[in-house]
Structure formats: structure tokens, C-alpha cells
Image: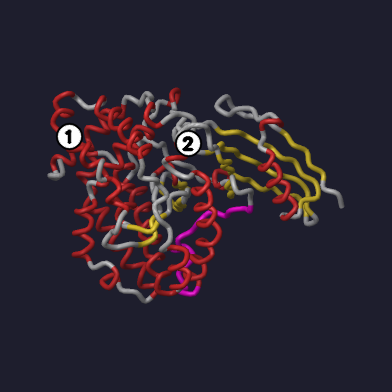
Amino acid sequence: MQVEEVCQYNVQNNKLHSVEKDDYPADLKDDIKIIAKSEGFVKYNVKVKKLPVDGGNYMAELYEIDISGITTEGEKEINIFAKQINLGSGTLESVVNISELFKLEKFAYKELYQVFNEIQENAKVPADERYRMVKCYDSNPGAILMANLRKQGYKTYSRIDVVSLDFAEKAIKNLAKFHALSFAMENIKPDFFDCKIKTLNCPLSFGEELRSLQKSLFSIAMSNLDYDLRNRVKDNIFNKLCKYRDYFEKPEISWLCHGDYRVMNMMIRDVDGKIEDLIALDYQIINYGNPLKDLIYFIFTATDRKFRKSHLSYLKDTYYKQLEYFLKYFDLDVDHSLPREKFERIYEETLDYGLIIMITIAPFMFADEGDVPDVANVSMSSLDFKVDDAYKNYLRDIVEDFIDWGYL
């Protein structure tokens, strides 16, 4: 039977840009045809929405794609979220190999996903306690196509809002499961771990372009600090930025790290305001290194000074207890992998990674929606953009925390 395809390109609100047929990437269109065939469609429509870049993604064009029609078993609809690579013409490629990031994410959604499922199934981890990942479809090398969780009732939080304690607990417990699975995998599937995980180096290139990017972001940060505070801390902060590479080389403990574990890379489903499910996304920077970088990264991208004063110790304790609990499913003792005393010491030694990463990440988080930087097409040394007014308060909170803790 011949398959009939009818492509519709429509937009439902003024924040979404109309996708003309000629603008719809040919490779992506081919992927959709293959998916439609593999899913048994004999007649189908394709609806495409191109999503705006709003500070959450800088290396891809984003699309929502709905395939609906008739299969041999009746009516069917598939909802897909797609990221199509955008290499651009700037110097970003000299900081990070964008094509390699897409390969890493495909590896996570395909191979790592299968291994996680296998070892959790064999350990009889209850379904509602397992670490879960989103379904991913086969695609061209420059695209990631996954199930569109928004169509399943999931949503994301704003990239700049402080999360609730409920969200923070769920996210940190989920991260502890991810790290526990890394340690379990090393013990249960050592050949896979040695071949596939230990070889995952940090995808950043620590060269001149990265230093130029750091200098640009440092300038943005310092221009948003009050004069007295800026003069007090700028030299110390700059010296810490120069040690950024140290946090990725020869860590005392090394597990599989997510690398970009922040609110924008999580989707939640809630009922009456209470979160019932959380799924992490975006594994483009997964690497083998110090897992506490992930914990600290999340804390400082998701909370403010007031929240940290009230809950930081509790969240750190929540992470460790969940790590201990989840490892027991695999007959592993947290004291053999990461004793509490060692955990506390490495946490203290790693904590100022939160300051370094926020000088680097926060300007992008707080980028004005009308002035989102086109990092794929500009030089890192000339990067400059407006940030939301909330950025000043956020940055001051971070700096004052590290002064109080004795790091500045």
C-alpha cells in the first residue's frame, strides 16, 4: 500500500514562527518519513511548529512535530520534539564540538537508556522508583528526535524562577539515582563502563576561545555588581575562573555526570501543584568526572540566597540519603563508594564550582528575551547582550554567599 503524506505548516500563536516547506530541513523531513513508516502509518498528516530560542537553547533549531493518521490497526498520533543542529558561522565550534554533543546525547538516549533499564529491571527496582529517560527516535546525525513530553502533560519551569522545595527535592533525588546507576553500572557491567563511560571526557576545549568567552562573561558579571562589591571580589573571581579547567581534570572520585543538570533541562508533571513525576533531558555534556559538580550546578542554577540559607544543608543531606538508599537495590554500600566524611570534604572542596559556573551560565539564564545572544554566529571575544533586571540581585546573592562561606 502506498503511503500518503500531507504536510501542514501552521502556527497557533504569535510566539511560534511559521515553517515554510523550503525552510523545513530536508534531513528532518526524511527522518519523519522513516518514523511514520516504522510506526505503521499508511496515510498521515504532518504538522510542524518552529519554536523560538528563548535562552534555553543555543546550538539547535527546535521543532514540535505531530504525525497523525491511519495505520493498519486504526487511527494513531505521534508527538515529537526535535532539535536540529545549528553549527552557525561563529567561533563556538572552537569552544565545543557541537556535532560531538549530538552524538553524546544520542548515546545517552539509546545505549545508556538500555543499560539503565536492564540493570534496574534485574535489580527489581519498582517501576515508580526507577530513573527514567524519554523515548528517542532514530534520526540523522544532526538531529535529536524524542517523544514530546508536553503532549503528555509535562511542563518546564522558567529558567530564572527560584524552584519550590518540592521541585528541588525531586530533582536532587533524581540526580542521586543517576549517579547511583553510574556506580552500579561500573560494578555490574564493567566492560561497558570501561569502554563507554570512562572515555567520556569533558566536551569543552580549554583553549583561547573559551578564555575569550569567560572574559566576556566575566565583564558582563562585573558590570552588574555594585561598585564596592565589584572592587572587593573581582580579582578573586577572575583567578577562580582561570582554574575552571581544574574541576574537570583528575577528580578524586569519578562517576558518570549529567553536565547540565538545571531546571530548563527537566520536565515535570504535577497534580494540584504537587510534582508527581520529573524527567531529566539534554545529555549533551555528559562526562566522566566529579559527580558533586552536578549537585552544586543544580543548586546554584535553581535557588537564591534566601532558599539556600533555609534548605542547602537539607538538600545536601537529601542527595546523600537517596544515594545510599538507591545503591542498596544493587547490593552496594555507599560507605564503600563514597563515605559520608569523604563526601562532605569533596563537597566543600567543590562548592566554589558553583560560583565559577554561575559567572559563566547566569548571563545566558537571564538573557533578555529580546536580545538572546546568537552564540553560534558571533565571536566569543565580542559576545555582549542585555540581561534581565533580576540578574543583578541573583549575582549579588551568589557573591555574598561565597563571601560568607570564606571562598572570596
Characterize the local packing of mark 2: few (<14), some (14-19) or many (20 or more) Cα atoms within 10 angstroms: some
Separation of residues labelled 2 and 1 (CA atoms): 30 Å
Side (left or right) of 33 relative to 353? right
Q: Does the magenta stretch include residue 328?
A: no
Q: Which of marks 2 and 1 is in front?
A: 1
**Where does the C terminus fall, quadrant-wise?**
top left
According to the picture, the residue beneath numbered tag 1 turns out to be 235
Side (left or right) of 22 relative to 182? right
Is disc 2 placed on a helix, strand or loop? loop
Amino acid found under the numbered disc labelled 1: Asp
Specify the segment rendered in magenta. 122-138
Characterize the local packing of mark 1: few (<14), some (14-19) or many (20 or more) Cα atoms within 10 angstroms: few
Quarter occupied by residue 95: top left
Image spot of residue 169 (x, y percent): 33, 52
Q: Residue at x 31, y 67 (%)?
A: 324
Is disc 1 placed on a helix, strand or loop? helix
Q: Which residue is drawn at 30% across and 32% down?
A: 215
Residue extending furthest toward the right: 1
Image spot of residue 120 (x, y percent): 47, 69
Q: Which residue is drawn at 26% across and 47% down?
A: 353
Nearer to me, 313 or 354? 354
**Is tag 2's residue or tag 1's residue first in the polypeptide sequence?**
2
Q: Which residue is drawn at 40% across and 46% down?
A: 204
Image spot of residue 208 (x, y percent): 35, 38
Side (left or right) of 168 relative to 38? left
Q: Is residue 131 magenta?
A: yes
Amino acid found under the numbered disc labelled 2: Tyr
According to the picture, the residue beneath numbered tag 2 turns out to be 58
Residue extending furthest toward the bottom: 331
Quarter occupied by residue 39: bottom right
